[in-house]
């Protein structure tokens, strides 16, 4: 139910028509299937002048092949294509006409509109859903902040991208498991324990507890410069945690509880959800099995006292499994985690939404898995390395240094969210002080604005966070999309009638309206592409295009230069236009949901 379908029909008809008109063509271009796909379908273009058709096939590259001029080819083939389109059951709404060197495909707009809008209005939020994922399991790991550290903007992008991917995959029928894998183990907890024992006061557990813990941690490092023996104490404290001494474990549990309370609050504000949360420590007793497996496979060796896997890749350092002091490492844990996830879920795909700065880590992990799979001659079915993907992303560059003062140089996410919400609220108070739920709306918009920044560029690109841009209601922002959605809701309120089913769609005959319908038709393919490329940006950029296309309808002027209102005295025309409004509103809202943004009905 998308433009794709019409393109496909055209490609089939065109391939048949070329075969009929030039019986020798396959000697030149080979396989019929390939011809249809590569020479026709893939070559379809969108004409600059929409009156030339919805899409077109340029025939320049056939000229040499067929030893005929492009216009001659067009003249010969166009009517044959059209005949083939007509002969389909049911007859295709696509028509073919030739102009110059182009085979133009037009779509009978009444049937296009009827099909497109009918489908959206019937399926409502389910529009764009599919079952391509049914029976398949996708794991998406995202967020994964560190215990006893504040939730900084550093973990925002992973959280937002992962949350969106979880929703996108669900929409496509996958069984999705959203995983949060917080860092809750490591020698830093030895330091935390020592610092807490030495300097905590009853005040430590009051107010902004995570900030207080960070202060203790920072203090440990300053003091340890003067008193190196603190480092020994920290090592001893971590050892006691490892050997499960109750007092050490109690403190560690307390740190975890404090951090999780903060994280959960932030996930609540962001509207982010997980299906499974487990920390690094969960894998403590699962690493030895991986190490012995790699040893048994003969893949390990000793390097300067450490147990490593050499990776026969000049660009990657050996994978460190165990250090001299026996402490196991991040990588060993991730290997153990990969096997655990596999045993638990038999996933088809396992995504790790983690910044590009950890690219080498994931390359190492995948390389170790590959070596193991080769060595053990595992069948394809059992090969994790082809199912695991590092979904990497670039940095967030924060222009505003004023946000980074409160706790060292970490920019606290909650400060950013609070500020966004406050600025939005101020704006609403100025522009629309009578709005019913100001606080709630300000929160949806402010938080949405921050979320949108993380998805407004391809994920591998860095993001510049500039306040003026983030909250610009007319820019390429979340608030702009939300505002467009609210405007559509307001039209529906004004219309105040249900959108009927006996609509004369042929009344939507303005170029601007057709463009909107075309954009609506793209949605299912966009969602599928976003999943295939792990790229929510496809959805965010699509929604901006859709909103821009609709705003052209909204602002369209008639011949007399007056705004051609959506709702007018012409009841039939208004009904048709309101069907369009409802369809756009549905897709906008659903698209915003897929990105993790709310869509207020009024703002
Ligand atoms: N906690 C880690 C960090 O903040 C991210 C964990 C990423 N996930 C993983 N499976 N290694 O850097």
Image (spheres, grey):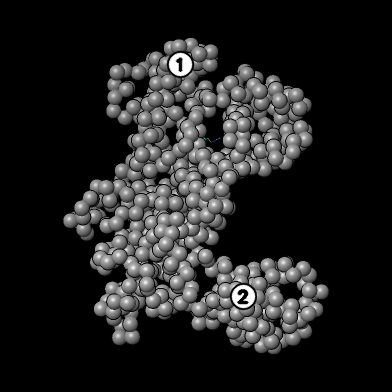
Which of the 4 quarters of the picture holds residue 286? top right
Report x, y in % for residue 360: 62, 39
- Mark 1 or 2, nearer chain start: 2
On screen, residue 544 versus residue 528, left or right, reads left
Q: Which residue is mark 1?
A: 249
Please say whether residue 218 is visible from this viewpoint.
no
Report x, y in % for residue 308: 70, 27
Report x, y in % for residue 556: 35, 76
**Whole-Å distance between the Cαs marked 1 and 2?**
72 Å
Q: Do callouts 1 and 2 mark residues in contact (Cβ within 8 Å)?
A: no
User: Which residue shows up at 32% across the image and 52% down it?
Assistant: 445
User: Which residue shows up at 21% across the image and 58% down it?
Assistant: 432
Secondary structure at badge 2 equals loop
Q: Is residue 500 above or below residue 256?
A: below
Q: Is residue 531 above or below residue 257?
A: below
Dividing the image into 4 quarters, which one contains the C terminus?
bottom left
On screen, residue 344 versus residue 125, left or right, reads right
Q: Is residue 364 above or below residue 50?
A: above
On screen, residue 55 versus residue 581, left or right, reads right
Q: Is residue 362 above or below residue 439?
A: above
Secondary structure at badge 1 equals helix
Q: Which residue is mark 2?
A: 88
Which of the 4 quarters of the picture holds residue 472? bottom left
On screen, residue 28 versus residue 220, left or right, reads right
Q: Nearer the viewer, residue 544 or 127?
A: 127
| Crowd rating for badge 2 (residues with CA inside 10 Å; few <14, some 14–19, many 20+) | few
């Amino acid at each position: 139910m998308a433009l794709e379908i019409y393109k496909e029909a055209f490609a089939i008809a065109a391939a048949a028509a070329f075969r009929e008109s030039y019986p020798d063509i396959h000697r030149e271009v080979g396989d019929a299937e390939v011809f249809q796909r590569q020479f026709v379908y893939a070559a379809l273009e969108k004409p600059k002048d929409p009156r030339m058709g919805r899409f077109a096939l340029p025939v320049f590259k056939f000229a040499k092949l067929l030893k005929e001029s492009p216009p001659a080819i067009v003249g010969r083939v166009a009517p044959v294509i059209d005949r083939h389109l007509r002969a389909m059951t049911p007859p295709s709404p696509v028509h073919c006409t030739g102009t110059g060197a182009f085979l133009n495909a037009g779509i009978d707009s009444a049937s296009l509109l009827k099909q497109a809008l009918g489908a959206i209005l019937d399926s409502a939020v389910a529009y764009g859903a599919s079952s391509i994922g049914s029976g398949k399991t996708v794991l998406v790991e995202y967020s994964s902040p560190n215990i006893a550290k504040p939730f900084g903007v550093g973990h925002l992008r992973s959280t937002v991208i992962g949350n969106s991917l979880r929703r996108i995959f669900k929409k496509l029928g996958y069984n999705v498991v959203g995983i949060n894998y917080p860092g809750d183990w490591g020698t830093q907890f030895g330091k935390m324990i020592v610092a807490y024992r030495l300097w905590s006061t009853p005040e430590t557990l009051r107010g902004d507890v995570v900030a207080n813990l960070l202060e203790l941690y920072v203090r440990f490092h300053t003091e340890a410069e003067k008193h190196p023996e603190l480092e020994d104490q920290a090592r001893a404290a971590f050892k006691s945690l490892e050997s499960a001494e109750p007092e050490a474990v109690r403190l560690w549990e307390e740190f975890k509880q404090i951090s999780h309370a903060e994280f959960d609050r932030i996930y609540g504000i962001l509207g982010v959800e997980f299906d499974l949360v487990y920390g690094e420590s969960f894998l403590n007793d699962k690493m030895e099995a991986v190490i012995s497996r790699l040893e048994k496979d003969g893949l390990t060796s000793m390097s300067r006292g450490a147990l490593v896997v050499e990776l026969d890749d000049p660009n990657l350092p050996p994978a460190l499994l165990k250090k001299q002091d026996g402490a196991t490492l991040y990588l060993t844990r991730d290997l153990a985690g990969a096997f655990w996830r596999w045993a638990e879920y038999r996933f088809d795909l396992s995504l790790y939404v983690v910044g590009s700065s950890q690219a080498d880590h994931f390359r190492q992990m995948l390389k170790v898995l590959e070596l193991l799979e080769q060595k053990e001659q595992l069948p394809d079915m059992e090969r994790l390395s082809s199912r695991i993907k590092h979904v990497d992303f670039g940095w967030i560059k924060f222009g505003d240094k004023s946000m980074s003062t409160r706790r060292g140089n970490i920019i606290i996410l909650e400060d950013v969210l609070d500020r966004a919400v406050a600025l939005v609220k101020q704006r609403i108070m100025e522009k629309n002080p009578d709005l019913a739920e100001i606080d709630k709306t300000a929160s949806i918009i402010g938080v949405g604005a921050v979320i949108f920044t993380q998805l407004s560029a391809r994920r591998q690109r860095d993001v510049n966070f500039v306040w003026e841009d983030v909250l610009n209601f007319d820019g390429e922002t979340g608030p702009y999309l939300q505002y467009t959605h609210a405007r559509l809701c307001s039209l529906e309120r004004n219309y105040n009638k249900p959108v009927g089913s006996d609509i004369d769609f042929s009344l939507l005959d303005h170029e601007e309206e057709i463009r909107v319908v075309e954009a609506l038709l793209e949605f299912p393919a966009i969602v599928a592409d976003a999943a295939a490329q792990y790229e929510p940006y496809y959805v965010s950029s699509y929604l901006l295009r859709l909103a821009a296309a609709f705003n052209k309808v909204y602002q369209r002027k008639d011949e007399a230069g007056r705004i051609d209102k959506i709702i007018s005295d012409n009841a039939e025309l208004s009904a048709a236009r309101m069907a369009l409004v409802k369809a756009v509103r549905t897709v906008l809202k659903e698209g915003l949901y897929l990105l993790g943004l709310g869509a207020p009905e009024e703002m």
